[in-house]
Structures are given as C-alpha cells and as structure tokens.
Image (tube, helix red, strand yellow):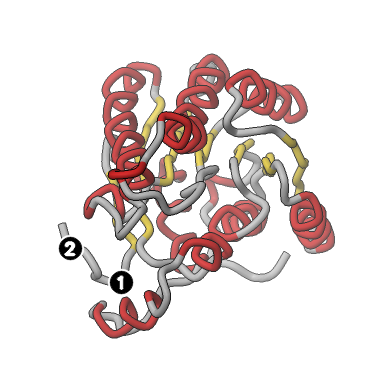
Amino acid sequence: MAEALKIPDLAGKAVLITGASTGIGAALAKAFAAQGALVGLHYNSSVDAAEKLKNEIDEAGGRVMLVRGDATKSEEMVRVVNSTASAFGRLDGLINNAGGMVARVPYETMTDAHYDAVMDLNGRSVLAATTAAIPHLKQHGGFIINTTSIAARTGGTAGSGPYGSSKAFVAAVSKGLALELGKYGIRVNSVAPGYIATPFQNLYSLPGQADVVAKAVPLARVGTAEDCVGTYLFLASDALSGYITGQMIDVNGGQVMS
C-alpha cells in the first residue's frame, strides 16, 4: 500500500462503506484499505467504476469485497450489510455514504413521487443499513458514520431543498442513534461535506456554482473527496475519538461555520 499516516486501531477492522464506487465513498474505500481495514465496497449502478476501484485497491495490497444493492430498497441494504459481515466474519463499522439529489425540483412543484425517491435514497437507506448492522456492531462495539451535507444546515440551493431536508433528517437520526446505541459501545457521528468536486456535483451543480463557492469560502477553493477522508478516519478510530458521539463535523472550507 502507498505510505499513509497509520492509525493502529483501524487495521483489521471490517468496515462497510455504502455508495463507495465514486466520489467521497471511493476516496474512503482507498483510505480505509490503506489503513489495513477490510473494506466492503457497496455500489449499485456504477459497475465499471466499482470494479476499477476494487482492482486499484487489490493491486495496492488492500482487502476489499464488492457488494451490490439498490440503496432505495431496504431488503437489499439488509442483504448488503449481512453479506459483508458474513464474508469478513464480523462488522466493526458502517459508513452510510450512499445518497443523491435525484433531480433539482423546487418545493413548489415537488410531487409525492419525488419526495419518496429522495427520502428512500438518502433517509430510508441509512435506517435500513443501520438497523441491519446493529446486531453485528453490538458484538464488539463499533462505529457508524453518516454522510449528511452542508445543505442540512442551509436548506440547499434552488431546487435542492428536498435533498437538504433529507440530509437534515439523517443528521437528526444520527443523534438519536447515538443516544440509543451508546450503551452498546457503538458511537454514531456524521460528516457534512460542503461543495466537494465529485461526480455528484457534475450532475447537480448550478451553472457557475463552483466558482462562486471558491470565491466565497475562506480557504478560497472548492473541496476534494480527499479533503473529507481525514474526518472519517478520525471518527472511526476509538484511539482518536473514543469519547465523541452524536456530533456532526462540517468539512466545507469555512463556507458555513457553526
């Protein structure tokens, strides 16, 4: 594996990352594999990207398995979790990263069908994967990290309000889970990325949005997937964050300060 700052207590941990074929999820899969973790790499439609990423991790000496499933279907996410735990013989961590905007739709014209699509992808998937993971995580204690968004704080931009609302739901769910699961030694936190240059932004950014953000944020640039990695590694490590739960950490270059 390429040289990286080693976090000793992550080596050998079995970690499932949903939505891990591209963007932040792909960066996380490579980073956890570089730490010596056993990585369950969940994907759905991005077959070629997932297989290419697996090959990269394999060639670098990491241990990774591909597990496919539709994040909008609870039964498939349950299968994804249980398949990963069965393959590795345990599950120590779950990163709920699968999600998307589906489409830019203003509240004024939002339909029930659009609401269901957004909430199933961003909200229901987190609940389904998490409830399936709890029995496994209870055996040794562990961590759950949910990917929210700056939109959970701001409400989103034009047409992304439903997406922002779904991510605010995830942020609240993370706190509720932290309250309930602490007694099992399971820590639950969330990460709220700002504008991160990923395929997600290629699909959904407004014209000129990247330039506007780069000029507005104190760090004077948009973020990269790699900018997010350290926060997830920190929250996954008991050695580094063993007394941190129920928190949302913003990674946005100072675009929003809380």
Which residue type does callout 2 highlight?
Met
Residue appearing at x 53%, y 35% in the figure:
94
Rendering coords of residue 154 (x, y %) = 22, 54
Rendering coords of residue 205 (x, y %) = 44, 67
Quadrant where the image shows the N terminus = bottom right
Which residue type does callout 1 highlight?
Gly
Instruction: Name the residue beneath numbered marker 1.
Output: 253
Instruction: Name the residue beneath numbered marker 2.
Output: 257
Rendering coords of residue 59 (x, y %) = 84, 62
Residue 47 as seen in the image, left or right of residue 143: right
Residue appearing at x 44%, y 61% in the figure:
228
In the picture as drawn, the residue positioned furthest to the left comes out as 258
Residue 138 as seen in the image, left or right of residue 183: right
Quadrant where the image shows the C terminus = bottom left
Q: Is residue 234 above or below residue 217?
A: above
Residue 230, by quadrant, is: bottom left
Residue appearing at x 58%, y 60% in the figure:
23
Q: Nearer the viewer, residue 212 or 75?
A: 212
Q: Secondary structure at mark 1?
A: loop
Residue 44, by quadrant, is: top right
Label of residue 153 in the image: none
